[in-house]
Amino acid sequence: MPEYKYHELGDLAKEAPKLFGIPTGTKLDEMFFKIEEEDGALVKKPLGGLPYLSVFNISGIPDTGKSLFAEQFAAYQASKGYKVLFVTVESPANFLYSAIKEKCKALSLDFDEVEKNIVVIDASEEEELRENPKALMETMAYAIKEKKITNVIIDSITGLYEHKEVMARQIVRQFFNFLKKWRQTGLFVSQKRSAQASESVEAAGGLAVAHIVDGTIVVDKKLIMSQREASLYKKPIGDVIRLIRIDGCRLSGHDSRTWVFEITELGIVNIIAPLAEYIRR
């Protein structure tokens, strides 16, 4: 007879993660919440960041700020003394060094502190790491163990299956389960294909990718091309309005509204206001 394994819910209490936020250094930290009881009433309390041990996709078309957000999150966490593993799949690691250094200047963070707390695996120039998930995960596991990593960023997860999208679900699930096993808070940067709606959670590999992770942050941009749009958004024709939205989160409550954000001249993601409120202003 096969052995059937099951758990009573109470048996899992000791292993259940605590619910608190891992700060990103952006207004996104106020957009996740938990419910607590105060004086007999249930109230929403800001979580203060991405839910601890969550794995999120950040999905969007090109030039919407995905990598900038990932770099900002890495720099902010590292500045607080937490170890971050950054897996570069698209751009060589030396470019990441320059980007993080500029982020620290713009955010007034101590680069010396940040520099020693970010560990980099360069899969962009190592075909074996890009093509062989097992080899990459073994390398990541070694780094996590040796450097006591608590946060992992893969930019982009799409680059690990760019010419074999039929395997997207399998590959994403392997890395999702890997981060859960190693108790990491994770961020997967996901590219979109040209046929996919820019405001949807769908990314390369299809909707299946979004179903695996704990939630998706969708970033989008809209080119203002008519007088009506210029009047609505109070921006000149030819300008761009940028939008961000948390599209689902399994681990905590979240603000599901679409928010307006900007990328400053220094390359910093600055979330401004909910879209409806922005238009009313």
Image (tube, grey):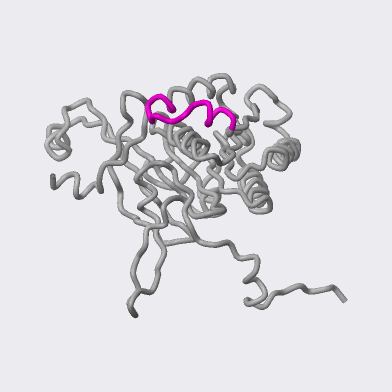
Side (left or right) of 43 relative to 54: left
Residue 73 image point, x, y percent: 47, 38
Q: Is residue 269 above or below residue 168?
A: above
Residue 67 pos. (x, y %): 47, 32
Q: Where is residue 165 in the image (x, y as percent from the top left)?
A: 60, 39
Where residue 158 sits, quadrant-wise, is top right
Report x, y in % for residue 228. 13, 37
Q: In this view, does 280 lie above or below 121?
A: below
Q: In terms of depth relative to the viewer, which is nearer, 17 or 164?
A: 17
**Which quarter of the rendered picture does the N terminus lie within?**
bottom right
Left or right, 48 with reference to 118: left
Magenta segment includes 45: no
Q: Give the main secondary structure of the magenta stretch.
A: helix
Q: Which residue is drawn at 36% across and 48% down?
A: 245
Residue at image coords 43%, 56%: 248
> Per the image, is 104 magenta?
yes
Task: Name the residue at 56% across, 41% down.
Answer: 82
Residue drawn at the location 33% of the way across and 69% of the way down: 43
* Quadrant containing the C terminus in the rendered view: top left
Direction bottom: furthest residue = 40
Closer to the camera in the image, 126 or 267: 267
Residues rendered magenta in the picture: 103-116
Residue lying at the far right of the rendered structure: 1
